[in-house]
Amino acid sequence: MSNSSMPSELGFIPGRVVVVGSLNIDRFLRVAHLPRPGETIFSTGAQQAFGGKGANQAVAAARFGAAVSLIGAVGVDAEGRIYRKHLVDEQVAIDWLATLPDVATGTAFISVDARGENQIIVDRGANGMLDAAHVTAALAALLPSTDVMLVGLESPLDAAVAALRAAESAGVRSLLNPSPIAHDFPWGEVAIDTVIVNEHECAEIFGAPEPAALIGRGVRHLVVTRGAVPTLLVSVTGVQLVPAFSVEPRDTVGAGDTFAGVLAARLAESAEWGDALWRANVAAAMSTLAPGAQTAMPHRADVLAARRLLQP
């Protein structure tokens, strides 16, 4: 179901979201178990799909109803051309999606086992060539009409930091998903409204998920996802728990990106934290019930219907 065919909601006004991040062609291998160091195994199937954390988050936000623009980079290869068309079909604006010569579109090699767990190796390709100047120029045009900006770290660190500084200067709410972790990230040198991490990333970056962990880091809110365990919202005023949902996952690839995209979309609608996190949790749980990242992401109508049925 596309955004244009979604049933109307009383008082619903789409939020405006800008995503700064990566685009990859995902190449999946299905395996009985994830290989151990030095082990060679055979796959039970192969598949290709659209991925990359930035594009995943943009598609998740667009399917939830947000007006989304994506800032990133692809190559001039066939994969880049196909990806641009795909994003247009998903109603993601690509005016500031750079097409770079002499570099391939990013590729991710993903092994998924019988339990839905995964291992991922990424060739950054064009993502690694996204520069701060392009991001700054794009945001100068987009931020005046933006409610929320979401940025990840699969793109170069200087581009991500430039995006956060631009959002701070423009007074736009910024969400950072610091994945993969950059150990040289300049915490405390730029203001960030919200950081989204899983519990492992939280432990490595912040230590304990408590208000004291935010002091000196320039972060107003810390969101910690924990699978089927309640999600944590940490701020200087305390810690709030929001129910998550236990499902039998078929594939966990893209669940975190679904969460981040839907959270950005809902916050862009000026939703309260409890509501925004609840819907993001529902969407993330639903995304694990089918294979692939973007292919498994639910649309807004599906999330709203499930929200009425699911009990924490």
Image: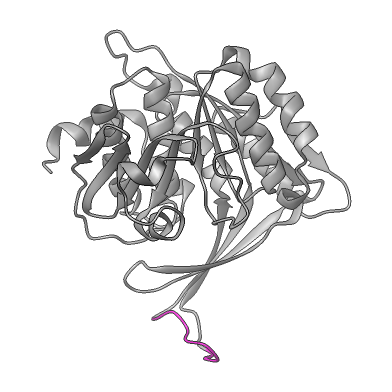
Position of 187 with respect to 233 (left or right) is: right
* Residue nearer the viewer, 124 or 226: 226
**Residue 17 forms part of the magenta stretch:** no
Prevalent SS, magenta region: loop
Residue 121 lies, with reference to residue 203, above or below; the image says: below
Q: Position of residue 153 (x, y in %)?
A: 59, 48
Q: Is residue 77 visible in the rendered structure shown here?
A: yes
Q: Is residue 258 visible in the rendered structure shown here?
A: no
Q: Position of residue 165 (x, y in %)?
A: 64, 29
- State which quadrant residue 228 falls in: bottom left
> What residue range appears in magenta?
33-40
Quarter of the picture containing the C terminus is top left
Q: Position of residue 109 (x, y in %)?
A: 59, 67
Q: Position of residue 259 (x, y in %)?
A: 38, 42
Query: Quick one: which residue is furthest to the right in this view?
Result: 102
All told, the count of numbered labels is 0
Position of 273 with respect to 94 (left or right) is: left
**Residue 38 forms part of the magenta stretch:** yes
